[in-house]
Image: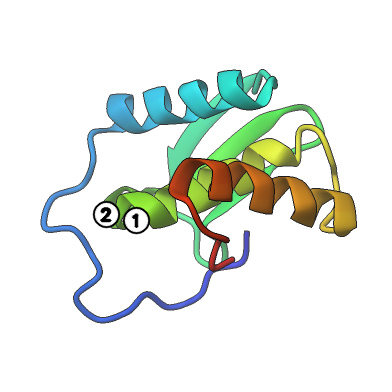
Amino acid sequence: MTRTPTAPGALLEEAVPTDLFKAEVRAWASRIGVEPKQIHIRPMKRKWASCSSQGRLTFDDSLLRQPAAFRREVIVHELLHLKVPNHGPVFRSLLRAYLSEDHGHAPAV
């Protein structure tokens, strides 16, 4: 997922612990019905996250300082790539469905 600037003041004062973030990813994976092979967190310059064709998810470490709603959008976006490898109509429809089901409205992605 391509990185865009965050709104001023949107960063959390403290980062979410890595184990809690990975648990959030695993919970969403279960809900979506996918199994990522690996979950990594490391600094990334141009993206918030990526998904390899082998099922490896990599998240930018600064995502841990973002608000929960934004983290959720990035997590669901990347997990859906384990089902749909592109950003076509099926992908966008699933993304909207999962995020609106959870949050009650369409995503900002």
Q: Where's residue 46, x and y in %?
A: 56, 68
Q: Could you say which quadrant of the image residue 35 lies in?
A: top right
x, y percentage for residue 99?
56, 48
Query: Is residue 83 depicted above or below 91 in this figure?
Result: above
In the rendered image, the quadrant that contains the C terminus is bottom right
Q: Mark 1 points at which residue?
A: 62
Q: Is mark 2 on a helix, strand or loop?
A: helix
Q: In this view, does 7 lie above or below 91?
A: below
Residue positioned 23% across, 41% down in the render: 16
* Alpha carbon separation for disc pair 2 and 1: 6 Å
Asked whether the beta carbons under mark 2 and mark 1 sit within 8 Å of each other, the answer is yes
Tell me: residue 15, above or below residue 36: below
Kind of residue indicated by mark 2: Arg
Q: Name the residue under label 2.
A: 65
Q: Which one is in front, 45 or 108?
A: 108
Please state if 22 lies on the left or on the right of 47 as rendered: left
